[in-house]
């Protein structure tokens, strides 16, 4: 039952989310539709006016959609709407009599207009496209009553015959040979620049301006510009001006300075009069300029240039096909025409090239209609005005209901989503994480599946909303199915994400992670190879540095080549291949070198893997392998020989020990007899001493053989190093005094423990103390120390040798070697060798140092912590 309950709860959560999501989406869509129509935040009288105006507009669209027929007269009569259509240019009816039938191009009523009627303006062309609907408002994504006017502007190419700039209005104009045309703001930019005009653009405009110069013009010292109104005024008053010396000055100086100017500037006035007659210049705007100023001619009139080539400003031209910078010496100053250009309704053009423009002109079939509508008393139940009244009662309710419904459904969707998230991926009765089929797919795959399903749902919704609902009663059902599919797909995808998150594998269950993981292994091998090369080859960093320097030089050389893109790709590929080859060669060389170094350090078992190696390195590696095999063979032979020697010594020692024991026993028996012959007694003493010495030698030989062969069984335990050393020194106290040797000890007061065999460690210390007694200089001091150093316990024995040490420390450690290199002492040369073998077999280390006559031995064992000693 629990499983059924869990599954049913999951299904209920999913259904609830889908249902309330659809309610929330529908509320949002209708709210947006109301807002787009201006109905959401409008109420009262304003809402009524908006609805009635929309109804009148819809009737206007229906009527004008059939303007070449009878203006949909049957539809108007069916719906109960009176309509009248007036054709005008600007929407201003002026003094037209709206009750006069001649005012209309069409109307379906004869009575006078009522007190309340509705007036709308509609623009159409021959190519207008009408969308018609019998609904006043359609909030289900379907086009309502609309008219779309496409391409009402036409473009006409024209050559530039002159260009000017109005400094007052900050606008540029071009002269097409007949009229001024305003230049679109995106086609130019008046800006500061010290570089001047571009060469090509400057040459083009020098020729344009040169072609505009009148044939009878002279070198002017002034420029003039005026509008048509000033020209008319000048022509009306020309006879009067000529009789009064034909000199016109600025308005504020006419009355007061006329006589004085006649006397002072007689020659200038005469020249101005002549230029005025030749150029037909408007005298009211004559401006005196410097003699070097450039004069630009537009329609036979002279205009001053806006500046010179070094003015610090340019007019940047941005054409669709070509652009350039124009110096101000080629731009006419149209500031005096500011009022005229601003008052006229000029066409607008866009720069095509630096010397041509595209002028905007309206479609010749473009017309404006004023439509007057008002309802009849017998209008139908589905007329636009009745629908407007119906909406007037519904929309105020929607103002409150839709936001409330949207908020409540949104909260329910959020709560159900949280419950679904909590339930998704819960553990079942057996402690396993529940899952679904999508959760096992990579995240990117589920996202693509989700995107495809969502795209399909959106396509279904869009198609049904745009077309099917207009023609089929099942349109809303299809839209609902599309919404359900989209929402449910989103729920499944969200569940898969949540389950992966709870599994802690959100990133690991992605294709990117799997690809990176697949790439990580070869990448890690490559990095390890580089580390191996750099760590094994001392000059590896130098090689890397040299390669980088060479690559940088090559890159800088390629950078200056024109066609560097294709070459750069080839260069990158070549460097990648070369780097891989170098790393591979150095890695193989590192293997060979490492093997050689290991062999030099005594490891003869190392082998070089020559698989897939280069020929030379493979031969080198095979040679090292052969050397290792040869050395191993030689070492094995030597070890075999050593074992045979050891076995021989052991066997011979055992064979000698049996008769020697008999000799010692009989010597002992003879010594117990009472001999009167002193000579015989002295012989027995010598025989006894040498027999015991021979026994000691044989015992040492057997022990050395066992220590070297590793056949001694040690009883490892925690040994008190301090007590054992004190016992060893005490054993030799009498012999040390007999040799007049003073022992200086440095032993800690507290107990120090090492792990060793107590008996054999005492033997090591005994051999070293015996060595001091045998070989120390009489009357000297010997030093015996016990120290702790970094977790290690060190025994140190130091003494001054009686004889000259003409031998190295390593040779002294060999068997049967003595420091005096003679046979006149009781030693046999096995003491140090036995001590080292026993020390190393117990896990310690023994080091011997010879410095002149100073003889020093260090025996080191790991320290055992006191608390761990049981």
Image (cartoon, helix red, strand yellow):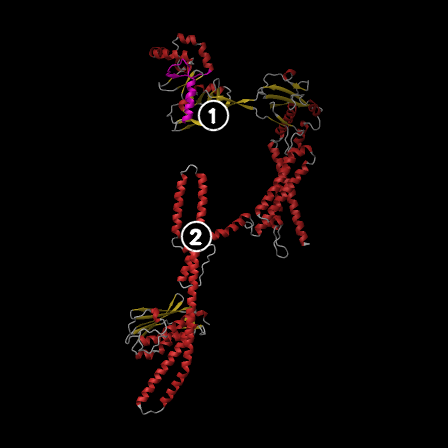
State how far apart marks 2 and 1 are (Cα). Answer: 62 Å
Q: Identify the secondary structure beneath mark 1.
A: strand
Going from the N terminus, do you reach mark 2 or mark 1 first?
A: 1
Q: Is residue 215 magenta?
A: yes
Image: magenta residue range: 198-227
Q: Residue at x 59, y 42 (%)?
A: 451
Q: Residue at x 40, y 45 (%)?
A: 551
Q: Identify the secondary structure beneath mark 2.
A: helix
Q: Is residue 625 visible?
A: yes
Is the C-beta separation of discs 2 and 1 under 8 Å?
Answer: no
Q: Which of the image's four quarters has the N terminus?
A: bottom right
Q: Nearer the viewer, residue 13 or 509?
A: 509
Q: Quadrant of residue 558?
A: top left
Q: Is residue 532 visible?
A: no
How many C-alpha atoms fall within 10 Å of the one at disc 1: few (<14), some, or many (≥20)? some
Q: Nearer the viewer, residue 841 or 74?
A: 841
Q: Is residue 745 magenta?
A: no
Residue 33 place in picture, x, y as percent: 61, 34
Q: Nearer the viewer, residue 512 or 649?
A: 649
Farthest residue, direction left: 779
Residue 555 place in picture, x, y as percent: 41, 42
The residue at which mark 2 appears reads as 585
């Amino acid at each position: 039952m629990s499983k059924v309950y869990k599954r049913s709860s999951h299904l209920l959560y999913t259904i609830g989310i889908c249902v309330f999501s659809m309610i929330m989406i529908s509320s949002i869509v209708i709210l947006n539709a109301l807002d787009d129509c201006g109905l959401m935040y409008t109420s009262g009288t304003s809402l009524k006016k908006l609805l009635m105006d929309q109804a009148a507009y819809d009737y206007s669209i229906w009527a004008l959609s059939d303007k070449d027929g009878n203006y949909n007269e049957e539809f108007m009569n069916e719906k109960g709407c009176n309509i009248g259509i007036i054709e005008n240019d600007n929407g201003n009816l002026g003094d037209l009599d709206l009750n006069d039938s001649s005012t209309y191009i069409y109307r379906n009523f004869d009575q006078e207009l009522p007190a309340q009627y509705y007036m709308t303006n509609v623009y159409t062309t021959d190519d207008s496209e009408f969308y018609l609907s019998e609904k006043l408002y359609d909030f289900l994504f379907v086009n309502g009553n609309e008219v779309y006017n496409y391409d009402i502007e036409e473009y006409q190419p024209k050559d530039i015959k002159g260009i000017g700039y109005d400094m007052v209005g900050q606008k540029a104009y071009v002269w097409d040979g007949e009229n001024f045309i305003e230049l679109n703001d995106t086609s130019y930019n008046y800006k500061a620049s010290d570089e001047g005009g571009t060469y090509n653009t400057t040459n083009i405009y020098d020729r344009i301006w040169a072609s505009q110069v009148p044939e009878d013009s002279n070198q002017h010292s002034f420029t003039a510009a005026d509008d048509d109104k000033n020209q008319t005024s000048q022509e009306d008053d020309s006879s009067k001006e000529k009789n009064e010396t034909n000199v016109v000055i600025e308005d504020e100086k006419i009355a007061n300075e006329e006589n004085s100017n006649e006397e002072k500037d007689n020659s200038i006035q005469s020249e101005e009069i002549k230029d005025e007659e030749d150029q037909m210049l408007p005298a009211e705007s004559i401006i005196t300029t410097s003699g070097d100023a450039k004069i630009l001619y537009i329609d036979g009139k002279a205009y001053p240039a806006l500046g010179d080539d070094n003015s610090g400003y340019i007019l940047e031209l941005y054409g669709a096909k070509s652009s350039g910078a124009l110096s101000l010496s080629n731009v006419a100053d149209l500031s005096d025409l500011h009022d005229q250009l601003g008052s006229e309704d000029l066409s607008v053009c866009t720069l095509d090239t630096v010397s041509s423009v595209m002028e905007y002109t309206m479609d010749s079939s473009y017309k404006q209609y004023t439509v007057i509508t008002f309802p009849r008393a017998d209008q139908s139940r589905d007329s636009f005005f009745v629908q407007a009244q119906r909406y007037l009662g519904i929309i105020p309710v929607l103002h409150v209901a839709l936001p409330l419904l949207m908020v409540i459904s949104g909260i329910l969707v959020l709560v159900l989503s949280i419950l679904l998230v909590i339930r998704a991926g819960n553990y079942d009765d057996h402690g396993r994480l529940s899952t679904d089929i999508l959760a096992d797919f990579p995240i990117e795959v589920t996202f693509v599946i989700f995107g495809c399903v969502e795209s399909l749902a959106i396509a279904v919704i869009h198609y049904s909303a745009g077309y099917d609902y207009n023609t089929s009663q099942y349109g809303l059902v299809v839209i609902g199915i599309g919404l359900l599919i989209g929402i449910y797909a989103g729920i499944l995808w969200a569940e898969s994400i949540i389950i992966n998150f709870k599994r802690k594998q959100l990133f690991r269950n992605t294709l990117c992670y799997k690809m990176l993981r697949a790439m990580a292994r070869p990448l890690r091998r490559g990095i390890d190879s580089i580390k191996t090369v750099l760590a094994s080859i001392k000059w590896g960093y130098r090689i890397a540095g040299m390669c980088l320097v060479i690559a940088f030089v090559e890159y800088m050389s390629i950078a200056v080549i024109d066609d560097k893109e294709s070459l750069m790709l080839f260069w990158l590929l070549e460097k990648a291949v070369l780097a891989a080859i170098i790393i591979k060669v150095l890695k193989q060389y590192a293997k060979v070198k490492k093997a050689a170094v290991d062999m030099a350090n005594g490891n003869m078992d190392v082998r070089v893997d020559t698989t897939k190696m280069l020929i030379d390195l493979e031969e080198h590696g095979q040679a090292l392998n052969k050397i290792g095999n040869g050395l191993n063979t030689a070492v094995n032979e030597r070890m075999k020989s050593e074992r045979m020697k050891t076995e021989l010594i052991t066997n011979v020692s055992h064979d000698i020990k049996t008769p020697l024991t008999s000799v010692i026993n009989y010597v002992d028996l003879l010594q117990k007899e009472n001999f009167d012959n002193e000579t015989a007694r002295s012989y027995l003493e010598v025989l006894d001493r040498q027999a015991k010495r021979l026994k000691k030698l044989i015992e040492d030989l057997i022990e050395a053989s066992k220590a070297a062969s590793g056949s001694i069984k040690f009883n490892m335990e925690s040994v008190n190093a301090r007590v054992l050393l004190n016992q060893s020194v005490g054993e030799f106290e009498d012999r040390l005094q007999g040799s007049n040797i003073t022992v200086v000890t440095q032993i800690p007061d507290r107990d120090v423990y090492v792990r060793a065999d107590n008996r054999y460690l005492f033997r090591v210390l005994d051999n070293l103390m015996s060595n001091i007694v045998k070989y120390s200089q009489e009357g000297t001091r010997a030093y015996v120390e016990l120290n702790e150093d970094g977790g290690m316990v060190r025994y140190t024995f130091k003494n001054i040798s009686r004889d000259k040490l003409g031998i190295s420390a390593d040779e002294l450690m060999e068997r049967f070697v003595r420091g005096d290199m003679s046979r006149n002492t009781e030693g046999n040369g096995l003491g140090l060798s036995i001590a080292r073998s026993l020390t190393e077999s117990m896990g310690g280390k023994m080091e011997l140092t010879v410095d002149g006559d100073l003889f020093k031995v260090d025996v080191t064992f790991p320290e055992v912590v006191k608390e761990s000693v049981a």
